[in-house]
Amino acid sequence: MMPGGRNLDTIAATCIITLCLACLHVTSLKSQLFTRLGGLRYTTEPPISYKTLYFDQKIDHFGFLQDGTFKQRYLVADNHWQQPNGPILFYTGNEGDITWASCGKLQNSWAPCWFSQNIVTMESLCHLVKTRTDVKHLNYLTSEQALADFAVLIQNIKTIVPGAQNSPVIAVGGSYGGMLSAWFRMKYPNSVVGALAASAPIWQFPDMVPCGDFYKIVTQDFAKSGKNCDANIRRSWKAINNVSSSASGLQWLSEEFSLCTPLKNKNDAVSFKSWLQETWVNLAMVDYPYEANFLQPLPRWPIQVVCKSLGFDSTVSDEQLLHGVAQAAKVYYNYTGNAPCLNTSQTATSSLGALGWFFQACTEMVMPMCTDGVQDMFEPEEWSFQAFSDECYSVFGVRPRADWAGTVYGGKKIGSHSNIIFSNGGLDPWSAGGVTSNISQSLVSIMIPDGAHHLDLRYSNKLDPPSVRAARALELKYFQKWIRQAQKSTGTGFTTSKNRKNSP
């Protein structure tokens, strides 16, 4: 389905989707380092046709003692790219198996309105590192290495692919990939003429945004989705404390929530609450207007469905309240009805690879988050850099650099850069650390009030709200502008009447 149902003539392009390192899709990091992964692989998305290739990539782009390489896998779908000098969309993706990433999202959102589909997906060193004890290799998992990977691959493609030498390249990415997209344009303006950074929290770092804003947005999503919904989640933590104070209460909770592993003690109850908190956060990220399966298979507007079980007034008992919470949690974990029990060690699809992100969070991606229980619906918890640093050291033997992201990428002082779109959804908690207002004429913000996490990069859908359709149309206009500017500067471009007709 094309946005707006239009079927325009297309200008051919190469769409390169690159998955490197890890992402912010998983959950926020507070006192606990590791989020829980797992779940079903369930999809109704259309199949994607591609070729699988490999590229000899340097392990270390910035040192000279380590001159080794590794095989970076990338996927190519080059059915319609026209030569010469067709524009390239370079998708700076996220962690995990590249075959899980939806290379076709660009094909099915705004890309078909103007670009033909030719997709390459690159896999990073991160995917090859399997254990947290392999710190020798984890040490190369940095955003800086990822950006260099991108630049080297683009240079290689322009060298070996006939007709690509003068192709203008646009970086596109969402979440952590959106951060990489923006940073790629900032650090390698010679490689990309512009970037779309969707749901990219480039300011979710120390002293850039308030640590509590992320959870405020989660709470607002639940507050607007059902009467008393956020209030009852806020009340549920005390109810869990009360019920879990006895062995019989722990057993009741285990049975009520259909837990795979019964709760046995106070520590189990604490972990249980963390699991629920991550569940509500994930629901806010994937509150899409149609059935989707980004983290779990879910109904359309899943928070509205969840809140149907949480509309109690303040007079209900702890058990009645927690019965509603259990029903709400099962919307997230058992929408398909196929789950025999709920596993509190899992909150998202197992296709997400988290190890690389955990290491990055413990090195250069320090993202403070806190709750106060008043402006949000969670138990109060302060942010402690020292506690976080100690936990990182106990797991990886490394200490995070709290200010490194601001130092290397400029923090909020990015006004000297150009040609970057920052798109954010009003429902997405990660917008708390995103760029949500224009910085200059070429560093622009596009807000999608009805959008959850990078909705504009997802497949177009007949249930898409007008706000995301408008966002995609505006993003497309910027792409067209950047490409025309690049082609004018190099004296290259298409000569077909089709190209001239469809340029704005």
Image (tube, rainbow, N blue to C red):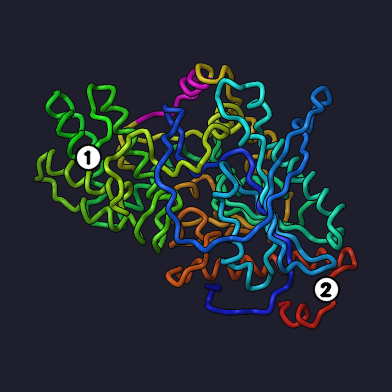
For marks 2 and 1, the one nearer the N-term is 1
Residue range (magenta): 381-392
| Residue 203 seen by the camera | no
Which residue carries the number 1 mark? 257
Amino acid bearing label 1: Phe
Most extreme residue toward the right is 491
Instruction: In this rendered view, identify the residue nearer to me: 373 or 482.
Output: 482
Which residue carries the number 2 mark? 494
Mark 2 vs mark 1: give the one in front: 1
Expressed as whole percent of the image width and height from the top left, the position of residue 142 reads 66, 33
Q: Is residue 223 left or right of residue 176?
A: left
**Within 10 angstroms of label 1, few (less than 14), some, or many (20 or more) residues?**
many
Residue 69 sits inside the magenta stretch: no
Instruction: In this rendered view, identify the residue nearer to me: 469 or 417.
Output: 469
Instruction: In this rendered view, identify the residue nearer to me: 400 or 432.
Output: 400
Expressed as whole percent of the image width and height from the top left, the position of residue 405 reads 63, 35
Q: Please name the predominant secondary structure of the magenta segment in the image.
A: helix
Residue 385 sits inside the magenta stretch: yes
**Which quarter of the image is occupied by the C terminus?**
bottom right
Amino acid bearing label 2: Phe
Expressed as whole percent of the image width and height from the top left, the position of residue 475 reads 62, 65
Q: Is residue 126 left or right of residue 370?
A: right
Which image quarter: residue 172?
bottom right
Which type of secondary structure does the marked residue at label 2 adopt? loop
Q: Identify the residue at image location x=69%, y=48%.
A: 74
Q: Identify the residue at image location x=16%, y=30%.
A: 251
Which image quarter: residue 502?
bottom right
Q: Identify the residue at image location x=79%, y=24%.
A: 66
Expressed as whole percent of the image width and height from the top left, the position of residue 354 reads 52, 35
Tally the marks: 2
